Structures are given as C-alpha cells and as structure tokens.
Image: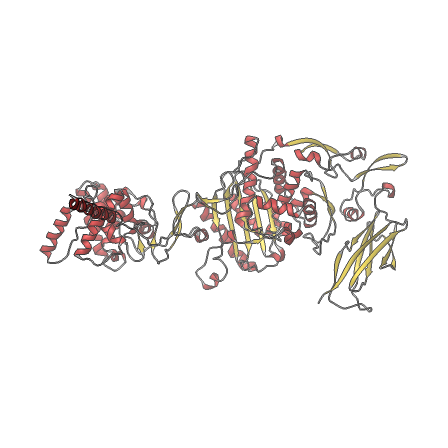
Amino acid sequence: MKRRRIRNLVWFALAAGTTVGYVRLLPKPLFDAPYSTVLYARDGELLGARVAKDGQWRFPPGAALSDKYLRAVVEYEDRRFYRHPGVSLPALVRAAEQNRRAGGVVSGGSTLTMQLVRLSRGNPPRTVAEKIREAILAVRIEWSYTKEEILALYAAHAPFGGNVVGVEAAAWRYFGHSPEQLSWAEAATLAVLPNSPALIHPGRGRGELLAKRNRLLERMLAHWVLDSTEFEAALAEPLPDAPEPLPRHAPHLSDRLAEGRAWHTTVDDALQVRVQQIVDGYGERMLAANRIRNAAAVVVDVESGEVLAYVGNISPGERAAEARDGRSVDVVAARRSTGSLLKPILYGAMLTEGQVLPNTLVFDTPLQMAGFVPSNYDKTFSGVVSARRAVERSLNVPVVRMLADYNHHRFLGLLRSMGLTTFDRSADDYGSTLILGGAEGTLGEMTGLYAALARSLLRYDRTGRYEAADMRGLRVDSSATIQKAEGVCPLSPSALWFMFEAMSGVNRPEEEAAWQEFSSMKRVAWKTGTSYGNRDAWAIGVTPRYAVGVWVGNADGEGRAGMTGVGYAAPILFDLFSLLPGGGEGWFPEPVGDMTEEAVCRRSGHRASEWCVSSGDAVDTVRIPLRGVVSRVCPYHRPVSVGGETRGWFVLPPAAEYYYRQRATDYVPPPVSAGGRPLEVIYPQPGAMLYLPKGERESNGFEKFVFRAAHRSDSASVHWHLDQVYLGTTRSSSAGGHTLAVSPSAGEHRLTVVDDAGYTQSLGFTVLRRE
C-alpha cells in the first residue's frame, strides 16, 4: 500500500511538472522583436512611421485587418483554420502524400498557427523534430489565444519582402493605404506573398507572383468567397510597383514620441499637411532673404487641448547642406527665450489682484534696477502709458515697473503653477529680465498656456465657476502630453477678458508697420515676442476655438538683424488662422458676474476721486474686475488753488511730466503751488552704475556723460554739484528739461541738484571703467 501511494505521488508529480512545463512552453510575449514607431491621425490615416531598431518596417500589432485579407489568407494558407486545435491531421497526411509522390518536400502541411510558431522562433531549419515542436506549441497557442488574436499576430509578423514585415506595413509600403482599404486583388497578393516574399521585387519572378495571386482568386471564386464581377475586377488589377515611401507628415512629432509603439494622435492629417506647406513656404523665402533657417508651428483646439497640427520645423531636405541647417531639431519642444510673450500674463495677474485697472497709468521713464537698464523698442519714453497700452505696444520699461510692483518671485510661482516646466532657475537669478525674455520656454508649453487661459474664460462663462481641468496641458494622444498641467486657473475671468481685449487691439510698435496688414483678419488675441539679439521671433494667438503658436529663427541661436515677431512670425500666424474652419465663433463672452461698475478717471485709469471730477477731466462709470474695488484711487489729480478757487489738477512727477509733455499736446502744466516735488533727476538713476565708454577722452582724461533733470517750472534754474563741488547752473532747454555734460572719474560719486527755491535732490552713483 505504501509503495502504491509513493508511485501515485511520483506519477502525480510527473504529471503536474509536465503540465506546468507545457503551460510555460510559450514565451511572454510571443515576439520580442522591436517595432516601428507609428503615428496615426485622428481619423486613422497614417501620419508617419520610423523604422524599427533592427531596420525592419514592422508595425505594432493591433491595427484593424480587413475582412478581405483575412478571408484571403485563410483560403490560401489554412482553410480548416477555424475548426482545428492548432494542428490539422488531414493537412499533414495530405502533405506527406504530396511529398512522397514528388520525391521531396513540396508541402509542409503547416497550419496558420504552426506558421505563427515558426515566425516566433525565427524561422529555424525545417526538420522533423522542428515540425513536431511546432505542432506541440501550436496546440499550446490555441489554448491561450483566440483565433482572431492568432490571425492578428501572424499578420503582424509575416515577411512581405525586403525589410517589410507585417501586413499593415506591407499595405502602406506597396499600396499606399491601410489594410482596411485593401481590394480583393491586393488582399490576395498579400496573402500569397509570405510564401515567397522575394517575388515582390520588380524583375524577380513577378510573373510567378501574379500567377499565384490569380490562382488564389480562382479558388476564392470557386468557394464563393467573391463573385464573378469582383473576380474579373481583381484579375484586371496590376501588381504593385516598387515600395512607396511612407507618409512623413509629422516627422518631429514621430521623433518625440519614439518608443516603438503605435500612437493614435489628435492631429488632423489634412490640416497638418497644409500647416507644413505654409511653414515650408515661408521658410524658403526667409532663408533666401535673411538666412533664417528654421520655423515651427502648433495648432491647438482650445476646448479639448488637443494638438491639431504639430510642425516641429521646416521639412528636412535631402541635401547635406539642409541637414546642417538644424531642420531635424524639434523646435516645438526646444527651450527658447520667450521675449515679450509673458507681458499679457503679468497684466492679467495684476488685474486679478486689483493692483491695476485695465487703463491704469504706469510710468514710462528711464529706469535702472541693479545694473539692468531696460529700454523700449524705439529707445524713447512716453512719461506715462496705460497698462493696457503697455501690453498692446509691448513696451519694456512700463512692464518692468509692473513686475517690480507685482514681485518677480510671485510671478515666477504663478507661471510654474500654470504648467511652464522650463522656468527652472531661481527668481533672483531671473530678476527683472523674467518679463523680457530672460527665461526660456517652449513653443508647445507657451501655446498650451494661452489655450488653457482661453478655455478657462469660456468655461467660466458657461458655468459661472472654474473647473479643475481648465488648466490642463496639451495632449497629442490619450497617453501622451506635450504640456503637463492641471488645476484651477489662477487668473480671474474678468482679468482674462481684459487681457484678451488688450491682445486683440491693433496698436503695435510703429517701427514694425507690418502689423497693419493683419487688422482686417478675423478677431484674434495675439502677442508677438522678439528675444535679445533677434534670436527668436514668436507669435501666439487665440480665439474661442483655436490657439496657434509660431516660432521663427535659427535653431543654433544665431540672431538675424531685423528679425522680429511681428515681421516674421505674425504673417505665418495669420496665414494659419485663415486655414482654420469657423470664423463665426464670435468673441469671448464678457464675464459680467466677475465684474462690478465703478467710476474711473478717464485720464489716469484709476478709480476716480473728487478731484478728478472737479478738474474737468472725464469720469466714466465702467466695468472693472471685482478685485479692482481695492485698487488705488487716482493719485494724480490734486487740489490746486487757482484765483482763490480750489479744484483738481492732473499732476505728474517731474520726470514723467518731462516726457509726457513732448507727446500730449493738451497737457497743461500745474502751477508750482500744486505741491509735491518740482525737481527730479532723470539721469543718472539712484544707485546707477555708469560705464566709461571707449573712445577719445577729454583733456582731463575722463569721458563725458550727459546728466539730465526735469523741473516743473519752465523758468526755473537748477544748480548742479558733484561730490559737493559746484558744476554749473542750467535753465530749461525744452519742456522743462535740464542737461549738463559731466566728466566723473571712476569710483563712487554723489550728485546734488538744487533749484532757486531751495528744493534739493541728492543721489549716489558709481562709475566703472570698461576693460
């Protein structure tokens, strides 16, 4: 009894071990070959593909196979496929008899499942032992896979000539379309081809391939797979010529997503082709005119955040010179200086906090901050401009002052919270240059940011509140994003509305007169940017439906004289908007639920005071952001006694007044009795660092600097002292301006100015010698 029990246990262990071994016969996965990276458009069309790491065109399994191909391959290879368990005994018997009569191997009797085993094992030599192994594994495969899965695996790994593997790659390479669109003749050709894949090449037995295809068509006619009309039409179709090149509609996106898998993107194939054509067309003209070699563009659906077109650069050329032009660089993902692109965001942030109202005046006078001396595009100053106009005209000096008021640490944190991942240096490192292009962003993230802001405003209008996904980033596939961001928009809806209103204005820098040609286009909120040294030209625009971003420049960072955002990127931007459907989508609805009405001084843009009213300047009741009620009351209208009557008077600081009077012909200077400081040094600024320029020196060995001061009274005299040494006296030269040429030595100095009434201003500055 004990021996029998031991024997049974041994047999049980052997059976269990055999079962476990049999179960584990199949590798997981069945194939470990590398796959091509394949990109599909939103409608399933092929955008492009990259060859697999082993040099084969092998598309990942999973594409839908046409019924025509499935019926053709089953008819040709294994008519009993749906009835056998992996091995067909009748087929093996028939093959053995055929081989006996022929005196050699003319048929293997393999089922489709056995052929799948052979493909998975790398096509080893055909031997009896190998055939037995294939049969065992075929039955094992039938345990684990459905018939449909077996057919899909076979279709994905069968050889189709040259370096073409799998029916999907073959359909695109030989016929230029997907397997789902195969005709009966094409399906039959692909069904017989793996049996003799070399026949596909022109001049290598093409007649034999045609005969094999036609014989299969005859069998399919005989077995009622196709009717006589379909049969005749299929016979008339020629064999394919040499393999066709695969589409290359989004090569840079393909490189970015290269992981040896299929990507079902959100890209619109027809739009992608047209966007690429427009970018390429401009690229050729820019290269010829100004040696600008690269450009990129992205088109985004605002509501969904889906990328509709992704052009990473001008199409790569075939010539070696074009390969060196940096066209292989995906500029959509490249870090580039943002130029002025962030100015509207700062404007929106300050509106959100109630620090400014839409038309609040901001000083536009000479400025120096820790050695940083910003200047406007035309090197001039206006004295004061409205915050909105500063954004519209992309003025640097007023916006730098706005950033100082908002705080660059806070602003950097705000940008990061909205999904800008490339702003990875410290706020102190960026300093005031943060708003003028000192930070680097990518075209994808910057366009995604504006798309998210537009979506937030639209969704607020529909729901009366923000939604958690309003700030989500751009996506090109259900599992791939090119901007990762999610959360509630930190800018108020009213701030966004006023921001887009400012961006849609047609006031652009006068020196960039090309903006005028865009004024008749559909309404777009757009912002251009030009980086230091003319290395980057940007244009980003949004409507309620679309966001479009464009970058122009040289991928290697070479700047080109005259290359600006308005002159080079904006024309592409508006050509792209003209491609997009719609145009009747209207404009962003005004979020009145996030606004309140307030009396606002028309001249200063601040909340009106009693002195604004008494001055005779207009006061308007307008809508402002809700937080605007905490903003400052107009500080410029002051009580002034004139002829025994006290009334309001618009009074600017002397330096602002000096520049403002040169542009505002209706400005009436206040009397000296208006109060406040009447005298102000314009240059140098307190704490300034002045560099001795190179050139011919004066007789005393030092260079001359022209110091400037402004006085409210045109008749005032100003007395100048440097380090307590009297330099001279000046009287107004123009609109209250006083200038004096000074030759300070290198080192620290103190400048003091005094007017006739004894008003004094004193400031320190440092002169440094250039090496």
Q: Is residue 139 left or right of residue 275?
A: left
- The image position of residue 571, as x and y in percent, is 56, 49
Considering depth in this image, is 29 or 512 the residue closer to the camera? 29
Residue furthest left as drawn: 101
Q: Quadrant of residue 129?
A: bottom left
Q: Residue 314 at what x, y percent from top left?
A: 49, 55
Q: Which quarter of the figure is the C terminus placed in?
A: bottom right
- Seen from this angle, which residue lies furthest front? 2
Q: Is residue 109 above or below residue 146?
A: below
Q: Is residue 642 above or below residue 377?
A: above
> Which colour style is shown?
secondary structure
Q: Is residue 302 left or right of residue 603?
A: left
Pick whichever, 516 or 375, lies toward us.
375
* Between 701 and 72, the one nearer to me in the picture: 701
Camera sees residue 716: yes
Q: The N terminus is located in which quarter?
A: top left
Looking at the image, residue 416 sits to the left or right of residue 694; the answer is: left
* Residue 112 seen by the camera: no
Q: How many marks?
A: 0
What residue is at 60 percent from the left and 39 percent from the top?
A: 490
Image coordinates for residue 146, horizontal then vertical, percent: 26, 42
Is residue 404 or residue 399 the one in the foreground?
A: 404
Tell me where residue 135 appears, x and y as whole percent: 19, 50
